[in-house]
Amino acid sequence: MTSAPQQPALLPLLPSGPHGSRDAMTCLFRCGNACDRPEPNGSGNGHLRDEVARVVQRRSLLKGAGVGAGVLALGGLAVEPAAAAGPARRGEGRLGRVDFTPVPPNRRDAVVVPPGFRQDVVVRWGDPVLPGAPAFDAYRQTPEAAARQFGFNNDYVGLVELPRRSDRDRALLVVNHEYTTGTLMFPTGRYDAETQLRIEMQSHGMSVVTVERGQVAGSWRRVTPARARHNRRVTIDTAFRVTGPAAGDPRLRTAADPTGRRVLGTLNNCAGGTTPWGTVLSGEENVNQYFDASDGIPAEHAESFARYGITGEGRGWSAVDPRFDLSTEPHEAYRFGWIVELDPLSPGSAPRKHTMLGRFKHEGANISIARNGRAVAYLGDDERGDYLYKFVSRDRYDDSGRPRARAHNKTLLEHGTLFVARLTGDGTADGVYDGTGTWLPLTSDTTSYVPGMSVADVLLNTRLAADRRSPTRMDRPEDVEPNPVNGRVYAALTNNSGRGTAQPADEANPVTSSQTRPALGEPLVTQSGNRNGYVLELIPRGGDHASTTFTWNVLLVCGDPAAQETYFGGYDKSRVSPISCPDNVTFDPQGNLWVSTDGNVLGSNDGIFRVPVSGAERGRVQQFVTVPRGAEACGPLVTDGGRSLFFAVQHPGEITGATFEAPASTWPHTDDFPRPSVVVAYRSR
Ligand code: FEO
Ligand code: CA
Ligand code: CA
């Protein structure tokens, strides 16, 4: 390990524009260049003492190797250590146990897995999903075909078992399609603008794709649509039912829906979660960018829209569907930004938008069942300086298996209480970034805890409500997911170029200066802000997800192991893989954390990493996958008893300057242009 000299925290060596982590092309298409505007949170919350910000920069504070043990004592939990990575028994192939040689950083136009593993493409953009869908032809796309084919830019990946014994070798792959990249989808000049917009609109949403086990343990393949009765496309035309206390609120009513209870479509679906009752939750994230305003934003919505980054500079969709013009239909914007629930086992059922889980830039939602039987959802609002949230259901989960149990469980997200997190550091003299936290109630389904705001006000304008409770402003909360083995909760805080400038540091968001690498093989340079992200570990009090207090610690300060600010749970920094911009997280049956990344600023392609979280291996970050050039890795899912790793390769080739005719990637190499696809990796021997 080499150690770089300490740099002044706020003195970058390079000009450090806001697009610190993603390619400019991804910024444009993914989030509408959100970084070019001030972060929408102007509340001033979470600004702790500058003194802490300076103190926590000191590298010496991060040297404590005994962090894992210290945290165990803090949490007071009887935690069963996750199995450390060790030699696999021959033929076993379980990804949580098997030893592997980490994939080195690279810029290949390929999915790379360690020696001894294989990976197969399961389904690509354009592959038929519904019976009768035409074969994909990039030169003959139509909106009608897109609505029956696999959508663009796959993100969340869930796998739901089928109940019949005869289906035991099959399962339903449920996938989000977050956004579209028109310049990579269409041959230049081939389509008129309206047709192109309509195809892009149909290429958003979700897909349900039946898959079946392949010949090698851990492998899976797509079932032809004619044999797949559960296959489904959710598009911009799919009718959703609005549930919870804000359903029917006047602000949800539009000319097309005077009830305020029926919304067509879901947008910018990012991450998600599969519930214990076999449905899939999906987060509507950067929905602000889909709304135009031909004649300005009505004054009564200005404060709300500003807090949500809704500027009226949209994608021109109002030209083909007037509901996307805020000047005439401002309420349409309130109908997006929710957690949606889809029941893939019931292909004809209307998916639902749950107002009880609040409205913000939802990354995803992951459920635990608390000791008292309540369903608890952990939620992240993916914006620089925004918050972590939690929902606790009013009613209890029914695990009896009785005929009506599933119907009951499907109502759990309609009543309960929504909370926002405040994290308090305990000081840095202990050598660890850690402290205590409180879940502050915002509203139940009957009582608002925010003075001056009704229940519906809190749910429709959750960011404005949360601002009034002084929660902690975080570095872009992405996935927040409970570990089913140790009961702790892991939050990916992907990065924040403005930490230390737009927001002062605090002990939970401590890095104001970080090292990046302009290209592979080049030396590290120091930039202001948190460029490589963290993984935060939350420990519910008493191991109870319904508790309103918790302790926390920063498990990973991501980056290059040679960079002074990085920290890997106390593990030896000379023996870990570089990791940058954690985004989605999941767990294998041994309780190891798996992390995918979005926006690597260390010169390598993005990828997926395995990280044990307890025992001597705690913090041993090892890279298991790299994805092709220009892509991010999404939705990792370790399933089938730990034999299979599913993941989504999103926006391959999305590099500034690339076009359909001059692509920066041709992965998966079935065409001469890139196709976002879902992949499964497994042991080959
Ligand atoms: Fe779609 Fe928060 O990334
Ligand atoms: Ca501390
Ligand atoms: Ca994400």
Image: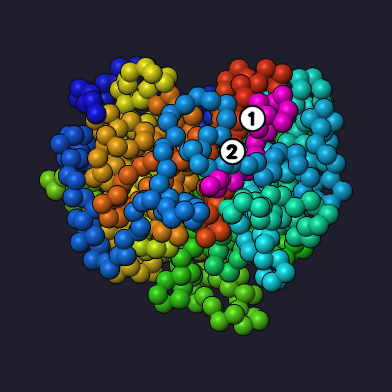
| SS at badge 2 | strand
Q: Secondary structure at mark 1?
A: loop
Q: Which residues are magenta?
A: 666-685
Side (left or right) of 151 relative to 521 = right
Q: Nearer the viewer, mark 1 or mark 2?
A: 1
Which numbered circle lies on residue 667?
A: 1
Name the residue at 38% across, 18% down. Answer: 521
**300 lies left or right of 184:** left
Camera-nearest residue between 151 and 549: 151
Which residue is most to the left?
429
Q: Which residue is mark 2?
A: 649
Q: Are marks 1 and 2 in contact (CB under 8 Å)?
A: yes
- Decide: is 201 above or below 426: above
Question: Is residue 305 magenta-colored?
Answer: no
- Does residue 235 appear in this view? yes
- Amino acid type at circle 1 is Trp
At 56% from the left and 34% from the top, the residue drawn is: 111
Please report the residue visible at 59 percent of the width from the left and 38 percent of the height from the top: 649
The quadrant of the image that shows the N terminus is top left
Does residue 13 appear left or right of residue 306 in this picture? left
Amino acid carrying label 2: it is: Val
- Of 311 and 647, nearer the camera is 647
Say whether residue 291 is visible: no
